[in-house]
Amino acid sequence: MPFSEYIKRVLATVLLLAVATALWSTRSILVLAFASVVIAIAIAQPMLFLQRKGVKRGLALALAIGFSFTAITLLSLWIIPTLGKGVGELVNEVPAAAEKAKVAYGEWWHATPSAQGIMPKIPEANAKEPLDANAIRNVFNWLVKSGMAIAPDLLGGIGIIASILVNLGLVLFIAVFFLLDPQSYIKAFLYLVPKDNHERTKEIVRTLYTTLTKWLNAQLFSVTVIVLLVWFILGVILGMPNAMVVALFAGLATFIPNIGAVLPIIPIGIFTLAYADPGKLLVYIPVYLAIQFTESNIITPQVVKAQLNIPAGFLMLFQLLITMALGALGLVLAVPILATLIVFVREVYSYDVLKLKNVKVHID
């Protein structure tokens, strides 16, 4: 190998490592930027709808942004305080309930000699840190902070909820700038690409836009179905407290594939234990799981499979990796990030480099 070729390969390797290091170091900013792009595409859908109805672009954009900001603000002012109030009341009741459970267990343990050799005896209440509302709140806050890996890193020291809201506002603010003049960003990107590849680059950008739009449409359908089913069955028919809050939470949780299906059990448990008979959990949770199973396996798949075709096992593995790298926000954006990567690799590497477009691959 000529020495000049060797130097070129070394420099290319060093450059690649430098780029990878830079991307990893700025991953928190990049995931927020990607979230801004996704939100910009979401806000663009009602804007484009209004434009098709004859509304001028400026007015359509203002209406779409205003509606989106109003909806997010109202939902935040409704869901977060309601859920927080339920958590607070439940936290205050947990110590007494735990003490009752401890007494009942102790009585059963002493009255059942056969169990004494198998089940441990609960120690007396002389712990250095007794179970009280403050201790439970500290544990709850620690769990929330541990789950939110992105927001505290960017804006630490201002509180968990405040940090999340500020990051959300930042994402929305950037999304608005993307919407004001999207063509300028594409033009700037084209200056990094050889002129002969401009048309192909624009085609790839359009494909990426179409992919994200299909994902958003599929999610909108899924959210609508789950909100209506949870509200009507659990709220109207079974009378579960704060059913609409749970329904909206369940709808938003559908953005988190696989894991999001079980997250609404948390507010169901909180509201039931705080405001209703705890025994009703034996009804509410199975009914919710049945609703989720019906929606995710019978109703939605017919729509989602027509929009995106991502293997479930590959998606779950990617979820684990993206959560370790990007935290909770990465988990929420796992599907669009993976779909974007799949499209980019397919269009650039498989089609352009390997020339596999319109080639059928057979597995014998």
Image: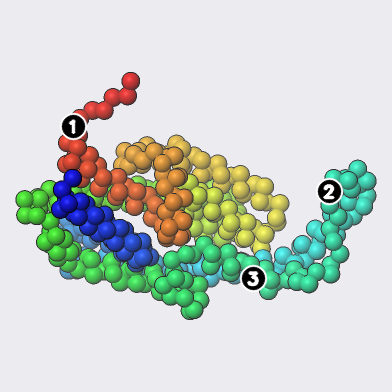
Classify residue 22 as left or right of residue 287: left
Which mark is drawn over residue 358? Answer: 1
Residue displayed at 50% across by 72% down: 160
Mark 3 is on which residue type? Arg
- Which label lies toward us, 1 or 3? 1
Q: Position of residue 37 (x, y in %)?
A: 28, 61
Pick out the residue farthest to the bottom.
158
Classify residue 169 as left or right of residue 81: left
361 is higher (above) or lower (below) than 55 = above
Residue tagged by mark 3? 137
Badge 2 element: loop
Which mark is drawn over residue 125? Answer: none
Mark 1 vs mark 3: which is more N-terminal?
3
Q: Return the residue nearer the eye: 183 or 301.
A: 183
Choose top left, top right, bottom left or bottom right for residue 72. Answer: bottom left
Pick out the residue farthest to the left.
196
Residue tagged by mark 2? 119
Residue displayed at 71% across by 51% down: 279
Badge 3 element: helix
Q: Position of residue 177 (x, y in %)?
A: 23, 70
Badge 1 element: loop
Q: Local crowd at mark 1 within 10 Å, few (<14), some, or many (≥20)?
A: few
Mark 1 is on which residue type? Asn
Measure how far apart labels 1 and 2 are at the Cα level.
Answer: 65 Å
Q: Is residue 311 visible?
A: yes
Question: Are the residues flagged by discs 1 and 3 in contact, CB closer than 8 Å?
Answer: no
Q: Position of residue 205 (x, y in %)?
A: 19, 52
Q: Return the residue nearer the eye: 32 or 321.
A: 321
Measure how far apart labels 1 and 3 are at the Cα level.
Answer: 58 Å
Give the quadrant of the N terminus.
top left
Mark 2 is on which residue type? Met
Q: Is residue 83 visible?
A: no
